[in-house]
């Protein structure tokens, strides 16, 4: 390691140049033009998810009118868009607003240390050549996503080393992988598997989607006819607003109905599936989950492409457990062996917060699974730090955008009042902590030791509802009695800020 460079001092340091980092930078530039900021990005490119994932067919699974930036609405006719188009859109937006000039590529934040006496974060970032760059900032804004970029979740499949062909994970798709005419098994039942199967089936000899248990799968049109009509006939901004609200309210309603009338929604989803498959198809076995809709994320297939691939015979579903991987394929618990030239493990992500960096508050490492989220954006006892964390039941960006606007309000308030420190402080008696995400998905359960907790009511509760959040973030008072504000001179005794988290009993 090289000696750290001299310090830069910034008002705000954003970590991550994906959708949420670019969105955050836009709002900071607009609301607080005099503040200095930089964006640290670990990779050599911006775009985050949409630059990393390169597997065939990679696309959004929520509509771009809500996943896109509200200040630069998505204009293309495709509501469900391909990865490369989303990547170009993020890159063009960063260039359009001059945000790209603030991005320091190839800088991975590895540690951030808060000092209450100085009211500052000292951030260490590792560069590609192994050097360490040190920066100092007053506010740290984590837009680093929610999963590990190093590798996806790869369960141990017995016998995997014996397999003669390529065994790939979609997060590290080999660019040169030739799958034309090949027999492919895609292991998985989530969004990635349902995206990959029809895309691979276009060129592969045959594709098998092998799942241990089914997920709910819903068909939506790639193009939103109403959005296209509005884009043609209404002024751009108005069309974007109407389409956004149409889609937001649709998602909220469907989620609400799924939670209140699960049998009705389940019936509708299964009916939709039956209509797209042969009457004899075993929908019960392959498409009827054991859980209720929205107990886990629902998979979206644009224009029913997965069902078309199954109908054509180029793809098939197999619902069974893996006994072992053998030289030429996978042997199932039922005794059948599925032959394969290529195996794809679409087995999910590894949840990771804070970009994997170590966070210290006055020398004490912060344990985020022992923290409560404040407005789903900050943490009990962690000063001057926000996190962009989107929705699990709606487009991610909707919540990140609200968070960015809230951070601007918070910083403006502190400027006006002369405060240098803000820290959410738990009321007494301590809130009873619950898991942050009310989902039974594997990746959520695996992340239990990583994710922070939530309480029973605002501001410690994440409602997973855009309308409620919009009201709370926009109209809720910044000085709500839960957020503690301090001037630097008041914080020289570190415990005044740092002890807050000690009162959390989890
Ligand atoms: C294949 C796929 C499809 C998806 N489709 C949808 C969808 O349709 N709708 C939806 O709502 N959500 C979707 N998601 C979730 C998706 O990740 C978010 O929508 C969104 O792209 C996340 O944006 P982000 O900027 O918050 O995080 P990311 O896109 O993950 O970007 C985070 C950035 O932070 C950088 N970073 C991380 N750690 C550090 C560090 N320590 N130092 C410096 N930089 C760091 C990363 O390199 C990355 O560039 C999808 C996810 C995947 C994997």
Image (tube, grey):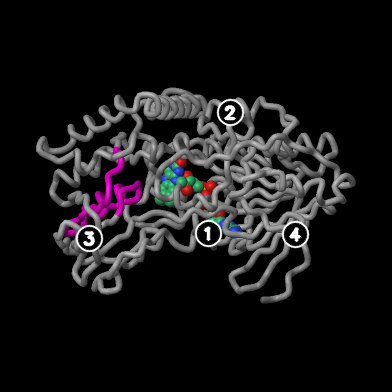
Task: Establish if 302 lies above or below 271.
Answer: below
Q: Which residue matches tag 2?
A: 470
Q: Which residue matches tag 4?
A: 363
Residue 416 x, y percent position in the rendering: 82, 34
Residue at 51% in and 30% down:
465
Q: Earlier in the sequence, mark 3 or mark 1?
A: 1
Residue range highlighted in magenta: 188-217
Foreground label between 3 and 1: 3
Tell me the CA gap for discs 1 and 2: 31 Å
- Is label 3 within 8 A of ligand 1 (CB to nearest ligand atom)? no
| Mark 4 residue element | loop
The numbered disc on residue 45 is 1
| Mark 1 residue element | loop
Q: Earlier in the sequence, mark 3 or mark 2?
A: 3
Q: Which residue matches tag 3?
A: 184
Foreground label between 1 and 4: 4
């Amino acid at each position: 390691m090289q000696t750290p460079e001299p310090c830069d001092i910034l008002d705000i340091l954003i970590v991550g140049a994906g959708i949420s980092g670019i969105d955050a930078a836009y709002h900071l530039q607009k609301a607080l033009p005099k503040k200095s900021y930089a964006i640290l990005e670990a990779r050599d490119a911006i775009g985050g998810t949409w630059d990393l994932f390169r597997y065939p067919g990679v696309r959004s699974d929520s509509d771009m009118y809500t996943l896109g930036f509200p200040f630069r609405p998505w204009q293309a006719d495709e509501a469900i868009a391909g990865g490369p188009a989303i990547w170009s859109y993020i890159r063009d937006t960063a260039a359009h607003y001059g945000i790209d000039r603030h991005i320091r590529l190839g800088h991975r934040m590895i540690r951030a240390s808060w000092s209450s006496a100085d009211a500052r974060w000292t951030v260490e970032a590792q560069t590609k050549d192994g050097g360490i760059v040190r920066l100092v900032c007053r506010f740290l804004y984590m837009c680093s996503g929610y999963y590990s970029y190093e590798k996806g979740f790869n369960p141990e499949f017995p016998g995997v080393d014996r397999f003669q062909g390529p065994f790939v994970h979609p997060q590290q798709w080999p660019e040169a992988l030739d799958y034309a005419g090949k027999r492919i098994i895609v292991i998985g039942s989530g969004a990635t598997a349902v995206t990959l199967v029809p895309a691979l089936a276009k060129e592969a000899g045959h594709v098998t989607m092998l799942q241990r248990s089914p997920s709910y799968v819903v068909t939506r049109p790639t193009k939103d006819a109403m959005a296209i009509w509005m884009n043609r006939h209404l002024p751009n901004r108005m069309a974007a607003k109407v389409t956004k609200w149409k889609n937001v309210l649709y998602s909220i309603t469907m989620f609400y109905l799924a939670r209140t009338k699960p049998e009705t929604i389940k019936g509708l989803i299964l009916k939709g599936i039956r209509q797209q498959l042969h009457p004899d198809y075993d929908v019960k076995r392959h498409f009827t989950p054991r859980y209720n809709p929205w107990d886990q994320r629902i998979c979206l297939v644009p224009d029913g492409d997965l069902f078309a691939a199954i109908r054509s015979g180029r793809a098939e579903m197999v619902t069974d457990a893996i006994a072992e991987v053998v030289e030429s394929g996978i042997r199932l618990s039922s005794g059948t062996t599925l032959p394969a030239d290529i195996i794809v493990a679409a087995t999910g992500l590894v949840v990771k917060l804070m970009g994997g960096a170590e966070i210290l508050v006055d020398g004490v490492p912060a344990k985020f699974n022992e923290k409560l989220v404040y407005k789903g954006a900050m943490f009990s006892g962690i000063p001057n730090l926000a996190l962009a964390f989107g929705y699990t039941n709606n487009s991610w960006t909707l919540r990140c955008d609200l968070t960015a606007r809230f951070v601007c309000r918070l910083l403006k308030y502190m400027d006006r009042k002369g405060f240098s420190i803000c820290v959410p402080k738990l009321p007494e008696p301590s809130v009873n902590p619950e898991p942050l995400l009310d989902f039974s998905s594997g990746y959520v359960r695996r992340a239990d030791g990583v994710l922070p907790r939530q309480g029973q009511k605002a501001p410690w509760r994440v409602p997973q509802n855009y309308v409620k959040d919009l009201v709370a973030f926009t109209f809720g008072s910044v000085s709500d009695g839960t957020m503690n504000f301090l001037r630097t001179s008041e914080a020289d005794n570190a415990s005044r800020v740092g002890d807050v988290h000690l009162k959390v009993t989890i």
